[in-house]
Image: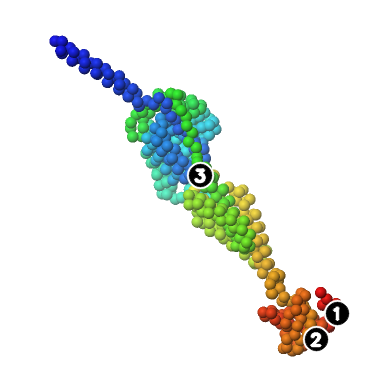
Amino acid sequence: MNRTQSSVISMLCAVSGFFLLFLAPAAGADEPANPTVLELKLDREVGPVLATYIAEGLADAAERHASLVLISMDTPGGLSSSMTDMIQHILASPVPVAVYVTPTGARGASAGFFILLSADVAAMAPATHTGAASPVVNIGFFPVTLDETMRRKIMNDATAFLRSFSEKRGRNPTLAETAVTDAKAFTEKEALDGKLIDLIASSPEDLIQQLNGRKIKRFDGTEVVLRLSNATRLPFQLSLRQSFLARIVEPDLFFVLLIVGTLGLYAEFTHPGLVVPGVLGGICALLALYAMHLLPVNVAGLLLLGLALAMFVLEAKVTSHGVLAAGGIVAMLLGAMFLIRSPLTNGGVSFWLAVSVTLPFALITVFLMRLVLGSRSWKLTTGTEEMIGEQGTVINALGAGLEGMIRVHGELWRATSPAPAPEGAMVKVLKVDGLKLHVTPVEGSGPANSTTFKQ
């Protein structure tokens, strides 16, 4: 090898070394220096608002290039449609998702069981439980009796959906199905031994520590090693709007808004000019309509509530000895129970709330309607119509069919009478015709004392 060739080789080695040094940091580019863990909370009933919250949180984690999304869960279950929406977003998330049933005593029941098994990492805290995921078809507090074919159809659909993602997550689909078919529930140890979850962690910090360096298999089959050393934990909170909407779609509050809205508008229509009941009732009614759009509301429940209102109104008009009022109370209670077709919280509207709202509503509605009916018999106290029935004194004698002058309320009026009335006699006003009064003499009244006319 001559000197020229050696020089060329030395130069190539130097250039190669330079590029290797320059590109060395890029080799670790996939390992962020400061990994981020985005924390979400699913700590109430599964519903449309929380489904939107989970979707927004997963999208935010993708934009931040977070290393992990940690969903802390404590839920009794909820709507199957919202559950399905959450699971679809979890399965499609570009960021690994860990669902963690916490704190101690928490549960991931019913729809929460499905969500737990759909995550890349399923974890539970000590003294927690999950399962009891049998589909429930209720109308208020009353379970619907299904024929065997329909029951098998619902069960098979639920178990097939559960198998579709639990198998790919490497979990035990056979044991998982028993939570649906037999409503079986599992403690954290039973779930771990049965390969339904991946680990037990005493706290979020413990969970992140156990996951650091762990290799997980994503839903698309790719494998990822979680690098969570010194991870920055960022909470993703419900927005004020979401928090507000999450409250009004709760069955109890929805029922209260519906009743208050109805009562406020009813009070305004029966007593125009009060303003405050109309404003308050209008706002509550619109909020109830919005919640009705999100909730699976049963039309039968709404019809029963309308029937109850009609019975309360009729109670004020018809002498029913309380039968219509009692019927209205029963109809409103049944309407509250039937109102939510697929319950979010233990059968929809709670019974004692329905009772505590129904009784005052019945009393107020009947009272307001009786005021309206009673006002129709009240004598007018303003305008010329208040003159009818009043008595006056003749100033200039009235002939039969001829005009004269009378004094009523200290005012002089032209008047005519079908019978003659002498000066000083008392007459009664029958009709007001512009500036003329039609009167008739008062029987047994003689001329009035002259002091009557002194101003």
| Mark 3 / mark 2, whichever is N-terminal | 3
Mark 1 or 3: in front is 1
Q: At 53% across and 31% down in the image, what residue appears?
A: 103
- Residue 258 visible, this angle: no
Which secondary structure, mark 1?
A: loop
Q: Which residue is mark 2?
A: 422
- Residue visible at 52% across and 40% down? 44
Quick one: label 3, few (<14), some, or many (20+) residues within 10 Å? few
Q: CA distance from mark 3 to mark 2?
A: 79 Å
Which residue is under mark 1?
449
Specify which label sits upstream in the sequence, 1 or 3: 3
Say which amino acid is labelled 3: Arg
Mark 2: secondary structure: loop
**Crowdedness near tag 1: few (<14), some (14–19) or many (≥20) residues, C-alpha within 10 Å:** few
Residue 241, numbered label: 3
Left/right placement of residue 136 relative to residue 370 reads left
Residue 379 location in percent, x, y? 70, 71
Q: Residue at x 24, y 18 (%)?
A: 15
Q: Residue 55 placed where, x, y %?
A: 43, 40
Quadrant in which the N terminus is drawn: top left
The type of residue carrying mark 2 is: Pro
